[in-house]
Amino acid sequence: IIVKKTMTKFVLILALCSNVHIACMNPVQDVKTYDTFGECILQAYDQSLQVLSTIDIKEVNDKELYTRFICKEKEDDTT
């Protein structure tokens, strides 16, 4: 008999947005899953910093760039 347990994991979805263009690029889902919401949301801030710091500051200012993110629950089947 195989018993399946369902554990809740979280996936990070992040998008780069512009206040000037009033739009966001297509969101990207992180390949990693996180055991807790807290781990996921802290990674969201880290990745936001990484993304924005790779863009020239003039472009960030001119386009008023920012990130949007969400940590969504994902059921993970384990045996």
Image (cartoon, rainbow, N blue to C red):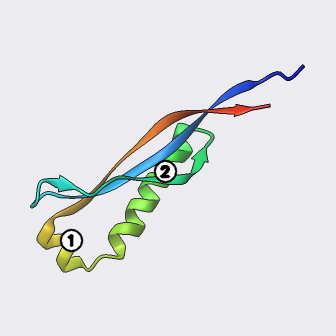
Residue hosting label 1: 60
Q: Dividing the picture into quarters, in which one does residue 66 lie? A: bottom left
For image coordinates 12% across by 72% down, the residue present is: 62
Q: Determine which of the numbered discs, if any, sits on residue 17 in the image.
A: none
Counting residues from the start of the chain, the first of labels 1 and 2 encountered is 2
Residue 50: image location, x then y, percent: 42, 68
Specify the amino acid type for callout 1. Val
Is residue 44 found left or right of 36 in the rendered image? Answer: left
Residue 71: image location, x then y, percent: 45, 41
Is residue 48 found left or right of 2 in the rendered image? Answer: left
Residue 52: image location, x then y, percent: 33, 68
Q: Is residue 69 above or below residue 17?
A: above
Q: Nearer the viewer, residue 20 or 3?
A: 3
Q: Dividing the picture into quarters, in which one does residue 19 lie? A: bottom left
Local secondary structure at mark 1:
helix
Disc 1 to disc 2, C-alpha distance: 22 Å
Q: Is residue 77 above or below residue 51?
A: above
Residue 38: image location, x then y, percent: 53, 41
For image coordinates 36% across by 76% down, the residue present is: 54
Q: Is residue 12 above or below residue 75?
A: below
Residue hosting label 2: 42
Most extreme residue toward the left is: 20
